[in-house]
Image: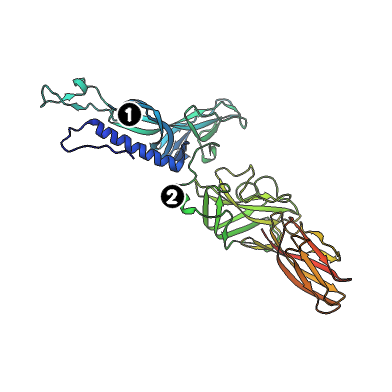
Amino acid sequence: MDRQIVYPGQIPLETDLLNSNRFAMIAIAKLAAAMLGTGTVANGLACAPTSPASLQVKVGPGEMYSLAALDATDYSSLAADTTHNILKQGISLDDVLLTCTPPATAGQSINYLVQAAYQDSDTGLVTLPYYNASNPQQAWSGPNNSGAQQATARKGVISINAKAGVAATTGSQTTPAPDAGCSGLWVVTVANGQTTITAGNIVAYSAAPFLSAPLLTQVKQAPAVVGMVRNLVMSVTTASATATLSADEIVVESALGGNTYKLANFSQVINLGATGAGGMDAGAAPANGWVAVYAIYNPATGARALLGVNATSAAAPEVYGGGNMPAGYSASALVSVRRTNGSGQFAVGAQLDRSVETGVVSVLASGAATTYTAVSISSTVPPNARYVSFTFGMSTNGASNGVYVIATDPTNEVGLRRALSPVATQILGGAWNDVRLVTPQSVLYKNDAVGGTLGLNVVGYKF
């Protein structure tokens, strides 16, 4: 950081103060760029209806950080500097009111783009006193006693306006692109005959450069791994389209390796019969399939919800990857994958953290294969399952004959689970927990019992 040097007895110059101001601005700009990057970033500037409601919206206080020339015009006696660009901060301290006029043609609507741009603004015009060498006792009024007013502050401000699109049949109207140098923040839609604007008419612009969360909040949130949970519970005691998922804490992210948020005291309901936040992301829940459940989060408002996704045919990603995330929600984490019945309802089951208990479901009745053979368990564990737990029953016709289940390498018998009969001709039962799944929804078994059989029942899985 640069600093101005002055000396005892030196005649002070106006450039002493001007350079000090410029040096401080450059230092703050470089620090901001190190934290935020050099792209435009907006913070605050929330858009809401007026109260009482009208055909105006108000854009609240906030800040905008944008790359701009060091000084596009002379800064008092310091020459303009357009060679160097720095990340400047524009500040808006008060609400800005914008009028959005409905179209005149029946059946039409129009989209207004609320856009903003950083600007330097020389303000505080005053006629300043100047030293009068011919009569020091009587100051001049303005430079050369001209009486002219001069700006006393160069402010970084935000220019905010509403750009009207082209009116069109409702549902077909489009949002205009931001003007050069501007960033789109919000889209306000008004229809013919509309007399007031409500919150439902206002949505964030798709490319709005809002800071997703305060940097201090982001620093406090890290480090964490997406999907980490503490005391997560989701129990379905009777088949139902609705279920409640609660947890002491859930970690969500904007993307793998992206912004991280820790959601404490989470408790939300999902309804498979609905769409959007609190329901399916799109369409109906699958019948006799699998639904992945995501915890989703809106950093701007703090809103949280659950979102269901059809995960029958492929494993769901750890962060929501579909194209139907509800507006404003930008962070998510996979928190459950559950079976549905023929009516598209949650099947009975209990979940603690990432472990799901399903009840006893038979997947192999009388297995007698003497070489490793695949058993499909797609009806009882989802594609996301990493481990499966079984109960088993076996019959043998000779002492020391065993039955094996393996989930990894059959050649080297890695991951071997074995049940051994201590005496001839015996029926045994037991459990194999946390058998790792290398091939999704499939395990391998081999029966070494001469004339014996193996029965397998899935009782749970981990994902």
Residue count near mark 2 (Cα–Cα under 10 Å), binned few <14, some 14–19, many ≥20 = few
What's the residue type where badge 1 is placed? Answer: Asp
Q: How is the image coloured?
A: rainbow
Using the image, determine if residue 399 lies above or below residue 95.
below
Residue 66 horizontal side relative to residue 4, left or right: right
Using the image, determine if residue 77 lies above or below residue 358.
above
Residue at 53% across / 34% down in the picture? 187
Q: Give the image quarter of residue 462.
A: bottom right
Q: SS class of the residue under badge 1?
A: strand
Quarter of the image that includes the N terminus: top left
Quarter of the image that includes the C terminus: bottom right
Q: Which mark is residue 426?
A: none
Residue 247 horizontal side relative to residue 19, left or right: right
Could you say which is closer to the camera, residue 28 or residue 300? 28
What's the residue type where badge 2 is placed? Answer: Leu
Q: In 3D space, how far apart are the residues under numbered discs 1 and 2 (Cα atoms)? A: 32 Å
Using the image, determine if residue 440 lies above or below residue 166.
below
Instruction: Please state the horizontal and vertical placement of residue 270, each as a whole percent of the image.
Output: 63, 54
Residue at 18% across / 24% down in the picture? 141
Instruction: Please state the horizontal and vertical placement of residue 272, each as a whole percent of the image.
Output: 67, 52
Q: Is residue 81 visible?
A: yes
Q: Is residue 273 visible?
A: no
Instruction: Please state the horizontal and vertical placement of residue 149, each as a whole percent of the image.
Output: 25, 24
Give the labeled residue for mark 2. Answer: 216
First in residue order: circle 1 vs circle 2:
1
Looking at the rendered image, the disc whose residue lies closer to the viewer, 1 or 2, is 2
Give the labeled residue for mark 1. Answer: 122
